Image (spheres, helix red, strand yellow):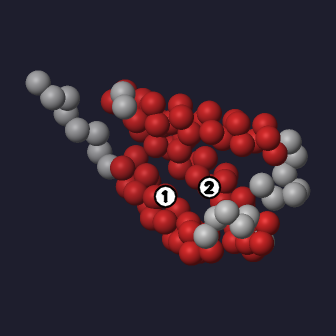
Amino acid sequence: MPPWMPWPRAAVLLSGGAELLGVAGLLWRPTRRAALWGLFALTLAVTPAHIYMLQEPALFPSVPWWALVLRLPLQAALLALMAWLALRPAHAPRR
């Protein structure tokens, strides 16, 4: 967590809870689109922490450097996938 972030423990717990709710929302068709947008926003919100970890890898010795480097392109791909899924037309209900 970047040092400028207030209440880091609470931020981690809240973001983790929001992530779990978002994943649960993906499982139910009526909430899927809202869950995708919520997860999209959450992914954007945690980007500063990922950038901070990449800038200060010595503070995170348990995380391999290659994982820190690959995290941002993977995050961009996930954002693109979530946006694509959220923006595509809804399908007709199955019979």
**Residue under the point 79% across and 66% down:** 59
Q: How dense is the environment of label 1, judged by Cα within 10 Å: few (below 14), some, or many (20 and up)? A: some
Decide which of 61, 44 is in the foreground and name it.
Answer: 61
Please state which amino acid type lies under the numbered disc 2: Leu
Number of the label disc, if any, that sits on residue 79: 1
- Mark 1 is on which residue type? Leu
In the displayed structure, does residue 78 sit left or right of residue 62? left
Image quadrant assignment for residue 33: top left
For mark 2, does the 10 Å Cα neighbourhood hold few (<14), some (14 to 19), or many (20 or more) residues?
A: few
Residue 71 image offset from top left, x and y in percent? 56, 66
Q: Which is nearer the N-term, disc 1 or disc 2? A: 2
Q: Position of residue 37 (x, y in %)?
A: 50, 44
Identify whether 83 is placed above or below 26: below
Dot 1 falls on a residue whose secondary structure is helix
Rendered location of residue 26, percent (x, y) = 40, 35
| Residue 44 marker | 2
Q: Is residue 57 above or below residue 27?
A: below
- The alpha-carbon separation of the residues under discs 1 and 2 comes to 8 Å
Discs 1, 2 touching: Cβ within 8 Å: yes
Residue at x-position 81% and y-position 45%: 8
Residue 87: percent from left, percent from top: 38, 49
Quadrant of the drawing holding the N terminus: bottom right
Q: Is residue 2 left or right of residue 16?
A: right
